[in-house]
Amino acid sequence: MLTYSFSEIGSDSLYEYLYKCIKNDIQNGTLSPGERLPSKRSFAKHLNISAITIENAYAQLLAEGYIYSIPKKGYYAADISAGRIPATAKPSPAPVKEQKEELYFADFASSQTHPDTFPFSIWAKLIREVISENSFALMKNSPSGGIFPLRQAIANHLKSFRGMSVLPEQIIVGAGTEYLYGLLIQLLGFQKLYAVEDPGYQKISAIYRSNQVKCCHVPMDSQGICMEQLRETNADILHISPSHHFPTGIITPISRRYELLGWASESDSRYIIEDDYDCEFRFMGKPIPSLQSIDVMEKVIYMNTFTKTLASTIRISYMALPHHLMEQFQQSMGFYSCTVSNFEQYTLTRFLQNGHFERHINRMRNFYHNQRDLLLNYLKNSPLSSRITITEEDAGLHFLMHVDTSAPDETIIQCAKSKGLRLASLSEYYEGSRFQNPGPGAACPNIPLGEHTFIMNYSSIHPEHIKKAIDLLCQAVQCAEHQPSSP
Amino acid sequence: MLTYSFSEIGSDSLYEYLYKCIKNDIQNGTLSPGERLPSKRSFAKHLNISAITIENAYAQLLAEGYIYSIPKKGYYAADISAGRIPATAKPSPAPVKEQKEELYFADFASSQTHPDTFPFSIWAKLIREVISENSFALMKNSPSGGIFPLRQAIANHLKSFRGMSVLPEQIIVGAGTEYLYGLLIQLLGFQKLYAVEDPGYQKISAIYRSNQVKCCHVPMDSQGICMEQLRETNADILHISPSHHFPTGIITPISRRYELLGWASESDSRYIIEDDYDCEFRFMGKPIPSLQSIDVMEKVIYMNTFTKTLASTIRISYMALPHHLMEQFQQSMGFYSCTVSNFEQYTLTRFLQNGHFERHINRMRNFYHNQRDLLLNYLKNSPLSSRITITEEDAGLHFLMHVDTSAPDETIIQCAKSKGLRLASLSEYYEGSRFQNPGPGAACPNIPLGEHTFIMNYSSIHPEHIKKAIDLLCQAVQCAEHQPSSP
């Protein structure tokens, strides 16, 4: 009969050790396929251990398929040879390259929110309240579109802040706009042609590419998307930020907005995705009305996010779908679980309901306004001042800085990097229509859409770093201008 | 000159009121396109208000595109007629049908976790610690795959609990497995053919359908996926739960596992997605080794989730990619933001690091073990006892209950519903291979894969409801059996 010594048992339990011994014998062929194993009782007697131990070991082997049983007959070693690959074939693991994190003294290319702006104590208090008061609701699965009170609070916010009439049922909450874009592709169709702005936020076209849908780039003039070129593309879905375009800051005027809505209404398959990502941060005047609010044909899908206003590391965004699309969503995609945890959905709901969000936005606006003013002031008093032109400084968390220089953008960026600054040039954001001259726009000032323009994103810069950052920037430009130009 | 009365100004500020008046005149044509507006100074004098007010109103109109300016000349009404749609065209909003929520006395079809099992006080304490000790890290954008300490903690857990060697760099954290399936489609390709288990978890094929990728259903015998039929499909990607199949509970034995790995190794494009969704809940013996742990060819993508073990409303899942796929992910999809908020990533990290997770799993296992025993005990002592066969009760949070009855499944489900019970029948989970007889499996007991089998998911049932739920269930079966059968 099979015999095993228990002298080398180590930290295993008796049954575990026995299980391993038998498994090993089956794997190395000592027990051949079909060979009968001792009955539990006789095996227990033979090994001088309890029958329960044998039973447990057999049960585990049975569950994993190393042995099989024939009722009233006994246990047999299984044939495990099929499709087996020699263990030596395992390739040695190569270290995976993570995107390496660079540390900058000042990062003008990051849209990360500033750590000091987050209302930690309020947020902590609200989470505490939610956990102690909403524990039952916290454990109840959220509807696909998000918990109703949050969607109600968002609808109220859109009403009071953007003058928009949106029912809570039209709102879908998700873990970031990137995720929502993916849902929209599933909703609107993979066969559709998607058009994005050029220049534009690169991630958007990356997401379309990653989903293997066709995506084209439509050039912009100073009023936004060029209508003629949009028509030439034959696009179905247009994805834009008409209230504040990134990175140029262009605001699409009302006439162009109506043209866009007119374009969308010409075909059933056409829709406009309106990304209103930083409408909360206008430093002058009222926020621009959303395209959604003047859409009478149910053609606009409105998108916004709390990652800009609250923290880039809290992943909550939302979209408002036209009624018929929401019906379609419920029917074909309502099976999806909401991707935002209930804990954060309920906490954000309280944050919105209790007026914290409005106060927070106002604080943030002041904070960023101050950041911008500091930055502009230091630039004005810098050695570069006579050679720079600032545009689009009245909204969002960045402005454009055109430098009158002969040094190539890439050289300036490299010199800046060597001094601990991260810069991004406008030219990096162009896909097809690089360096187009601004059109004969009326409502917008001329925007330097060409070379030597940098996007100065100041949301993540430490206020105390601003002065030195400008000094370093001036040095970087000088350094770039003194480099021998490549042949 | 343009004249407006300020007598009906209401709650608006002066500039806002003026802005609205002018906008209105442009919209209704009183001011025609190209018409020059009064200069700020003269207009201010005329209306007897400050020039600043005029300036603010003009600035807003300018920003929104209702007027345009010609430098050194003045402001002009813009042409907003293009593409405009009469406001009457707006369809009246129809209420959107949300998936209606039904309230059940006992829901045997829900996999929601039980509210009483969640460690609220520990979780609250850890969030508090994270907010007070990690505030800087909380505001730093997470890498695409998740914060490193969480991935490290998950790798450690997989090592100690599943005996798996996975580097933290191989792990991708996301807001639920549904989201991760979507990422995988983008990574592996939309042109591939995906194969899923039949019967199986319906959401998986719904996700493939929603992403418009081809998906086929492969029948199962008592050892898991039928190899021959798998080969006939020509599938590239196989999506399975070999350690505990839902809903049948089948455990794929080691021989079939090797066959599956062998199948995968035959072509470069083949991969196996191993969904290990409830490996933590085996009530007998050790957990079954994962397919990933015996894969020597980098063919297995391992998936697991905290939604089963922690709470279905905290959306954190993860996958472990083979090295070469992780490289590919970093290159082509590393731009994606992680969908789980930093707050929950850091909290879960502490929960894992401090041993809370292991203790929690043990508590949950006892809780569910007790649930199951109560349920089985009441069933054994019920009037139905002689007519029911229970299988697959040793793992997961459900078992299968076969009822010897002539009443159709649908009638039983309807009768149960009228009594406040939600039931799901096994037959609902079949796609193509409905009611196939179990194959001549050796390692697994015969599973009733046909009609009259119900999936008894007990994770969300209140312990004090169990006795009455069984009474209601017996009544429901009796009631169904007394209904006249349809002609």
Image (tube, coloured by chain):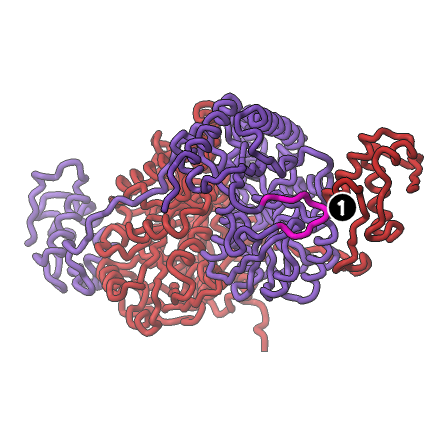
Chain colours: A purple, B red
In this rendering, the answer to whether B357 lies above or below B213 is above
Q: Residue visible at 58% across and 31% down?
A: A133
B100, B292: nearer the viewer? B292
Percent position (x, y) of residue A159? 73, 42
A306, A241: nearer the viewer? A241
Letter of the chain that mark 1 sits on in the rendering: B
Find out whether residue A446 is within the magenta segment.
yes
| Screen quadrant of the C terminus of chain B | bottom right
B332, B436: nearer the viewer? B332
Residue type at tag 1: Tyr
Residue A343 in view here = no
Where disc 1 sits, the SS reads strand
In this rendering, the answer to whether A73 lies above or below B320 is below
Q: Residue visible at 55% across and 54% down?
A: B421
Residue B153 in view here = yes
| Screen quadrant of the N terminus of chain B | top right
Percent position (x, y) of residue B395? 35, 50
Percent position (x, y) of residue A101? 38, 36
Quadrant in which residue A48 is drawn:
top left
In this rendering, the answer to whether B421 lies above or below B52 is below
In this rendering, the answer to whether A215 lies above or below A158 is below
Percent position (x, y) of residue B110? 50, 51
Q: Residue visible at 71% across and 55% down?
A: B95
With A323 as the anchor, is B278 left or right in this view? left
Q: Residues within 10 Å of mark 1 (few under 14, many from 20)?
A: many
Q: Magenta stretch: give its range.
A: A438-448
From the image, tell me which residue sits under label 1: B68
The tally of labels here is 1
| Residue sitting farthest toward the bottom | B487
Q: Residue visible at 80% across and 37% down?
A: B57
